[in-house]
Amino acid sequence: MGLFVIPLPRSFYERDTAEVAQGLLGKILVHRSPEGVTSGRIVETEAYYGRGDPASRASRKRTKLNWLMWEMGGLAFVYMVHSHWLFNVTTEREGVPGAVLIRALEPLEGTELMRLRRKTTDERNLASGPGKLTQAMGITYDHHGLDLTNPKSILVITDGENKSTEIASSHRIGVSEDLDRELRFYVRGNPHVSR
């Protein structure tokens, strides 16, 4: 991936959240950190809406924790759950809350650095879950609010190779209340999807 990558445009993110969640499958998340470059193909996502979505951080009202979900699409939304950072991308247009949780990556570049950060040599276990992913990629609250559409950003999402991917769906994982719709999307058969 190197120093220059072309990020996805804001128009990619400023659409229906479930469409963005599916569209992100196969795209490449790149982090250009001081320790080195890491990247991975996105293989699992979850869509979260605003009011009316009981599992969403934005289900009730705007708060200090969720305000970024009302901003423009294409921003990094990072928060902690059970002592793990979770990495989300804002969606929809400004004023309409939405975000996609990036749940799993297939490691591509910087796997040695990912192994060091995760303290494991099992490549299938490096980024196969939202907390593992942020640890492997070195993503923390310091990345909260970064504009992923800015080519100079240290954190971007770019187009992957045009590999045909069969998308499967299910209900979201680990939520106490869910919508009737299946809003978890993943690449069927990919070994890096969370277990």
Image (tube, rainbow, N blue to C red):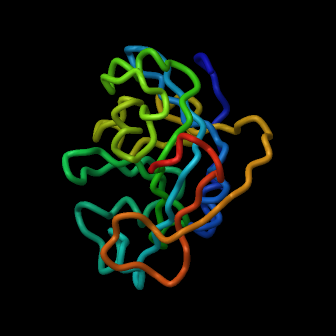
Number of numbered discs on residues: 0
The residue drawn where x is 64% and y is 27% is: 5
| Residue 101 percent coordinates (x, y) | 45, 55
The residue drawn where x is 43% and y is 32% is: 126
The residue drawn where x is 30% and y is 72% is: 62
Q: Is residue 42 left or right of residue 135?
A: right
Task: Depth check: give the residue in front, 192 or 34.
Answer: 192
Residue 193 vertical position relative to residue 185 in the rendered view, above or below: above
| Residue 157 percent coordinates (x, y) | 58, 39
| Residue 11 percent coordinates (x, y) | 67, 56
- Quadrant of residue 16 within the rendered picture: bottom right
Residue 117 vertical position relative to residue 176 in the rendered view, above or below: above
Task: Depth check: give the residue in front, 151 or 46.
Answer: 46
The residue drawn where x is 36% and y is 73% is: 55
- In the picture, the quarter occupied by the N terminus is top right
- Quadrant of residue 67 within the rendered picture: bottom left
Return the residue found at the far left.
83
Task: Depth check: give the residue in front, 67 or 46.
Answer: 46
Task: Depth check: give the residue in front, 113 or 35.
Answer: 113
| Residue 171 percent coordinates (x, y) | 49, 71
